Each structure stands twice: as structure tokens, then as C-alpha cells.
Image (cartoon, rainbow, N blue to C red):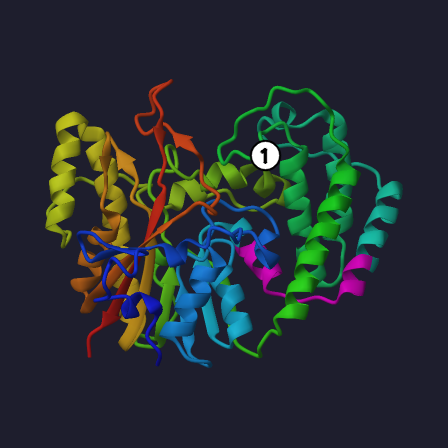
Amino acid sequence: MKQIALFETEGKNVEVNKLVKRLPFKRVRDEYFDFKDTPAGTGIYGIHPYPAMFHFLVVREIIKNFSNEGENVLDPFMGSGVVAGECLISGRNFVGYDINPLAVLISKVRTTPIPFNSLLETLECILQTFKEQKPETVEFPNIYYWFDEDVIKNLSKLRQVIFNIENSDVRDFFKVVFSETVRRVSKARYEEFKLIRKKDDDTPDVVKTFREVSLKNIGLLTDFYNKFTPHKVSLKLEERNIIDGIPLEDNSVDLVITSPPYGDSKTTVAYGQFSRLSLRWLGLEENVDRTSLGAKPKDINLGLPSDLLYKYIEKIADKDEKRAKEVFSFYADLYTSIQIIAKKVREKGFVCFVVGNRKVKGLELPTDKISADFFESQGFEHQKTIVRAISNKRMPIENSPSNVKGEKDLTMRYEYIVILKKKA
């Protein structure tokens, strides 16, 4: 198996290869992996926005260099299905899980090729049927705060028409279009992850928006699979909290590629808030924030295998004991998930664990090194960690790490590709 370029750069003269800089914790800054000129939302990955999405070219490189065709790839924090999409066009079998039903729906749509004419004909049918449809009563908390009355009526009519589509793949495709339409016609700021009401009072055109999003997504889906032929592989995408265990045989996975949550959606990436309005309109469960890593508080104990983690917990506790407990709870759940993941990887199999190092109380938490510590306790060898800029990743420019009004800080500008190999 070919070794990825990140290994080939080792030992080269820094004067010759200025892309690589040595850093602590086996970190290597490699600008090759920045992919600055290619948006992360290219092709099928432009179907429905999603927070903190993997850059598909990073995933493509990892798959190519750490797995072979026909092998099994696992993404236990699947998000919107970037790894699934790359496995489909590269001939790898894929299993993915996520706690967010909207993410699972988007993943399925991105990885289900449907003929152009079939989607276009269905769109015309939806628009025609819409005219004859009577609005139904739709109720959920704060619906009139987030939507104008006319918008609610038109969304309710659209939803009825879409839910009556017989073909499940086509129905799911237009559910995703509907979800993006909901985001666009709501009174929430479209570019924000958190639910923040915008100031303008213009009433948007629901049907026009739906048609525009439909045509965009039809083009993205069909153009992508005309360019990249999908392979006949096994794709399993499931809504599941991996903390509760995953139905895979031990030692059955050749490669894990995943990016776990950053921790504390209140101050970093608000997956739950991002999905809330869509989930309510789609009639799906809203358990994202209640079931994410660290959501259930735990008392600090000495049971986690990372001395570095406890140094940071102690520093945070000196400033705020409650925040220290919250941070510990996240890492405790992260360790539990890593214990579960580790068992599924075969001997000499690889894990590429992509993390962001968020700030708490002004301290940047070295999640990359802590994750490496956790995996090493489970029989893995830490190869190295690639540091890449996340200029193309949809992240908030600023956040409020203290949750104090007016106090802002820059969010993560880099992500860390932690590469580990399971010992024989």
C-alpha cells in the first residue's frame, strides 16, 4: 500500500520544502492539505449546507493512501456523508453513524444517484400539485417567531406534496431540498449555525426558493455522478449514538476516517441549533444537543489515560470549576467512543481522527494529542498529526468561549489529522 505524501515529506530539507514545519506532539504543518482553491462544498457536497464539513479532498487522499478497493471504512461521526461519498466513487465499503437524523438524510441523498429526467419530472409534478394543495395546520414552539404566516402555509403545502412521493429515494431527495428551503425562507440568519433572528422583514417566495434549490441540487447530483462513476459497494448509513455501541464485528474495519464533535455546542459548532427548524418541519427527533459527547455532566475522576488532559482540567478548574467539569465530561465520552471504535479496527488497520482544538477560558485544548493518548491506550501507535488550515470549512468566524455577552475570540483556524496504526 502506498504511503501518503505526509510520510514522504519527512526528512526533507526545510529550505527546499517550505510546506512542512516541525511542531510538538508529532505535528507537521503541511499546506498541501489546505486545498485553499477548492471549496469544501463542491459537487454533491454542495447539496444542503452542514457545519464543519470535512473537505472531500482530504478524505480522498486518506482513502487512497490508507485503504484498498473492496476494504471496509468506518465513520462513526458521519455528519453529512463526505466519507460515504468518497467511498462510493473509490470502491470502498462504508458504514457510518450519526446522532443527527438530518445529517443521515443528507448523507443518503448525496450518495444516491438518481437520473436527471426523473428528478426534473418530479419537480414539475410537485410544483403543479402544490397549486391545488390546501395548507394544513402546522404547530411547533415559536413557529411564528421564525416564519411568516404565508410562509408557513406554503411550506405546509410543499411538505404534504413531497411526503406523498412514492419513490423513497426521490422523496428523500426533495426532503433535503425542502430542508434547505426551510432554512432559506425562515427569519433565522442563513449563514449562522446558531438560531439568530435576522433584522429584515421581507417575506420570501417559498415556491421560487424551492425551485431554485431543487435545480441546484439536481445539477450537483447528476453532474457529480456523470463525472465519477459510483462503484457497486456496500453503504450503510444509520442514525445511532455510538456511545451505546455499534453493530459491527470486532477487527472488521480496515480504516476509520472521522471527525468527532468539537465539544460544547453552546460556544463552538451548534449542530442542534443548525438543524432544529428543518427537523421540526420534517417531523424528526431533536436529540442532537441532548445526546452529543459531553451532554451529560460527569464528576471529574482520574480514569482517563492522558496526563496532558488533567493538566488542562486543573488549569480550567482554577478559573471555573463548572467549566472544568463540562470539559471533562466531553473527553470522558470521547474516550468511551474511542474504546468502542478501537475494537472494530483490524490489526495494522489505520485510524485518521480529524479534530479541532477549541479554546476554553483562553486555553487551547490539545484535543489532537489527547485523542492520540486515548488511542495509544487501546493498542495503537501514533504515526503523526497533519496540521491543515480550515479556510474552506464552514465555521463561525468568531465565537463566545466565555458565554459572556460581548466577549469574542477567534475560532479554530486549523484542524489536526491524527494518524494512528493498530499494533499487530
Quarter of the image where the C terminus is located: bottom left
Query: Residue 219: where, in percent of width, then height?
Result: 71, 57
Query: Residue 174: where, in percent of width, then height?
Result: 70, 52
Magenta segment: 104-120
To which residue does mark 1 refer?
190
At x 58%, y 61%, the residue is 108
At label 1, the amino acid type is Tyr
Quarter of the image where the N terminus is located: bottom left
Q: Is residue 211 above or below residue 268?
A: below
Q: Secondary structure at mark 1?
A: loop
Q: Is residue 407 magenta?
A: no
Is residue 397 rendered to the left or right of residue 14?
Answer: right
Query: Residue 336: where, in percent of width, then height?
Result: 26, 56
Is residue 244 rendered to the left or right of residue 140?
Answer: left
Q: Which quadrant holds residue 359? A: top left
Q: Is residue 110 magenta?
A: yes
Circle 1 Cα neighbour tier, 10 Å, few/some/many (<14 / 14–19 / ≥20): some
Query: Residue 162: where, in percent of width, then height?
Result: 74, 50
Q: Is residue 72 above or below residue 6?
A: below
Q: How many marks?
A: 1
